[in-house]
Image: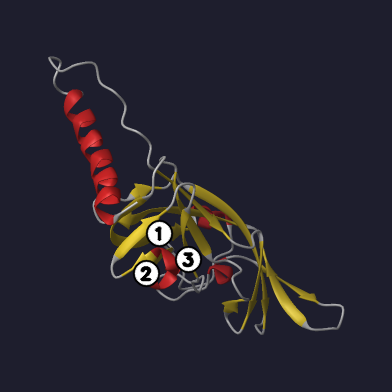
Amino acid sequence: MGLDRTVQVLNAVIVGMMLFSISSCEESLPPRVDPPTVLLSSLEMIGTPLIVVRDSLPIGTQGAFEAHVLNVYDEVLQDSARIRLTLEVTLPELSKFKVFAGSQGEQKATVRAGEESLVNSNLLWRGYLTVGVDTAVILRKLWNHRTDDGVPFWSLVNLHPGATNSGELFCQSDTLTLTVKGSVQVFNIVQPQVFPDMHIRIVYKVFGISC
């Protein structure tokens, strides 16, 4: 499929969505037809519930966010790219934990990602994104598991001392339930897709700190 055809397909879908919106307000128009579903998005955190932290950062991709935007249309989609992942991470249950001095109030982390976090970067070429049928755009974002003020989430809860079989000391946190809200966008002409609120249970196993 050539560039012109694939752009026409995506534009046709957007026009269909616009007509659907208009038809909901104009009773004189023909019966409305639901626009086709083109993209489906999903979000997960890798490695939960146990996240191992060394040198103040999770090991490897543990604790990273991974977003998938799947082409569920019956043709290839291609248009100018606008790749944006925006997330807000909070700890709503903060009041039930023993919070350390200076960490009172809302604890929030803002996580953002763009083209640099694209796993399958071969889909992007000279500003155009080409997504085949049943193909997903994948964004993977590593983050430091700290609030916007630099406070580690594991420091907001009780920590319990432990040791590995070899005698290496660590601190293990109480179970936290993080709430994640946000959206993802991959095409310039398609509005960001909002994720359903996520509630992620995490236990941090932190090496190199004092409990």
Q: Earlier in the sequence, mark 3 or mark 1?
A: 1
Residue reaching furthest to the right: 165
- Check disc 1 and report the residue beneath it: 87
- Residue shown at the point (76%, 81%) measured from the top left: 169
User: Which residue is drawn at the image coordinates 65% and 83% (left, top)?
Assistant: 209
- Amino acid at circle 1: Leu
User: In this view of the protein, which residue sits in the foreground, 37 or 93?
Assistant: 37
Amino acid type at circle 2 is Glu
| Label 3 crowd bin: few (<14), some (14–19), many (20+), radius 10 Å | few
Identify residue for label 2: 115
- Of 199 and 32, which appears nearest the observer? 32
Whole-angstrom CA distance, mark 2 to mark 3, is 10 Å
In the picture shown, does residue 158 fall above or below 137? below
Residue tagged 3: 120
For the C terminus, the quadrant is: bottom right
Residue 86 sits in quarter: bottom left
